[in-house]
Image (cartoon, rainbow, N blue to C red):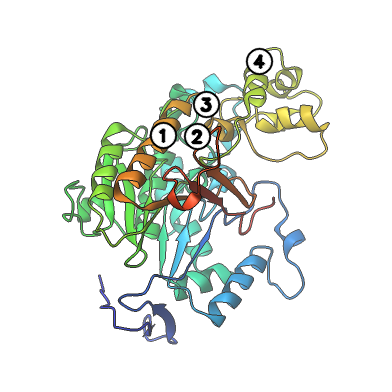
Amino acid sequence: MIEISLAQTEMTVSYRINGGHAIHFTVPGREQNMRWAAYSCNGFSAGINADEFRGPGHASGFDPVWADLLEKHAEKPFHALVGGGDQLYCDSLMREPELQEFVSLKTPQAKLGYQLTDTIRRAVDRLESSFYFSHYCLVFRHGKFGQANSTIPMVNMLDDHDMIDGFGSYPEDLQRSPMFQLIGERAYHYFLLFQCFVVDSVDGIDPNPGRHKMRSTIIGGAGAYIPYPSHSILTYLGPQTWMIMLDCRGERTLNRVCSEVTYRRVFDRLWELPASVKHIIVQLGIPIAYPRMNFLESALESSFNPLVALGKKNKLGMGTLVNKFNMDAELLVAMALLYSFSRLNDYGQDDLMDHWTAKTHKKERNWLVEQLQNLAFLKKVRISFLSGDVHCAAVGVFKTLTQAMPVNPVVDHRYMLNVVTSAIVNTP
């Protein structure tokens, strides 16, 4: 690891790889809060033609918004690039030739009992030509995104598409099936390797503060469906600003986002932040100040939903209305009911159950918000949320509600904004 000591003022650092051309990045001054950019959803969903979003002068549909970010970077360099989830889309794993026998199975029961072959294991994991290794090498050095992550220091937290769509929010039997166990184990390994520059077998998993090679890493509880503990990140963004990036995927189940062990270790570190810190940003892949969609949850769970029934039987072209793993309904079914098929997307029931506002996560959500508000009150800090996932730029807000005069946000410890980034590549 190379460490760079900060000077009194910001400075530009140059580096070369294997004697290649010089690449530059900028680090802040010692007493300077960082300029940083955040993004999410750096890829297209299945069935989207990327060329339709290319626009004049761009090599591909992946580039336009990254080009805009790089223009801003050229005007005044960013010191950090925050990846808030879905830094790449790994759903195309299911299009690999070796997996087509599994994909073509007709029933959820057949998929649950499908035994892995050496051919499948090699396809997912063989070095230099495995899906995840090759996919990372392609995405992270390609186009404008490759230019951005080579010139702006990055810090990342995963969401489901960094593994595979919906991972952690499927039923227990599917999550523990041989195929999903393999996908989860290898996807998380490559996330740590390429996005966090960590290998647990080398760097260790000591949870004690300051013991991990990456000092910003917070080792949490044991993974639910992966053989790794969760890896949250508490990162410095300047003397007055820190960001906690909560690993909301490693321990996720239908009934839990993070474990008590992880929350305890994260809050222990937050309480120890120096008094100079005035702003704590809580990065959560999925928005926490976001509407509940009770009707959609009920519609998708109903056995009387005719579109779900048609989708499960692949009748009348409705096969795409259920996911390919266990035939659960996609959220687009309910959206179609509401909007008369005016717009279909790939937003599925697994996505709905991912949400903090889903009924199975609502209690945990409320507890987390209250704990953070208590932290804000006692440490006299501002707390904000940063999220992505939903392909729509938005701002949610928590605040004190009273019957009398509104509480001034300046003195309201409950006042917390949730800034939601739009997809930097994917469709709205």
The residue under label 4 is 302
The residue under label 2 is 356
Sequence-wise first label, 3 or 2: 3
* SS class, disc 1: loop
Q: CA distance from mark 1 to mark 2?
A: 8 Å
Q: Nearer the viewer's eye, disc 3 or disc 2?
A: 2
Sequence-wise first label, 4 or 1: 1
Instruction: Name the amino acid, label 4.
Output: Ser
Report the disc number at residue 111. Answer: 3
| Marks 1 and 2 in Cβ contact (< 8 Å) | yes
Q: Position of residue 300 (x, y in %)?
A: 65, 22
Inspect this view and state whether residue 423 appears. Answer: yes
Sequence-wise first label, 3 or 4: 3
* SS class, disc 3: helix
Instruction: Name the amino acid, label 1.
Output: Val
Q: CA distance from mark 2 to mark 4?
A: 21 Å
Q: CA distance from mark 4 to mark 1?
A: 24 Å
Q: CA distance from mark 3 to mark 4?
A: 23 Å
Report the disc number at residue 178. Answer: none
* SS class, disc 2: loop
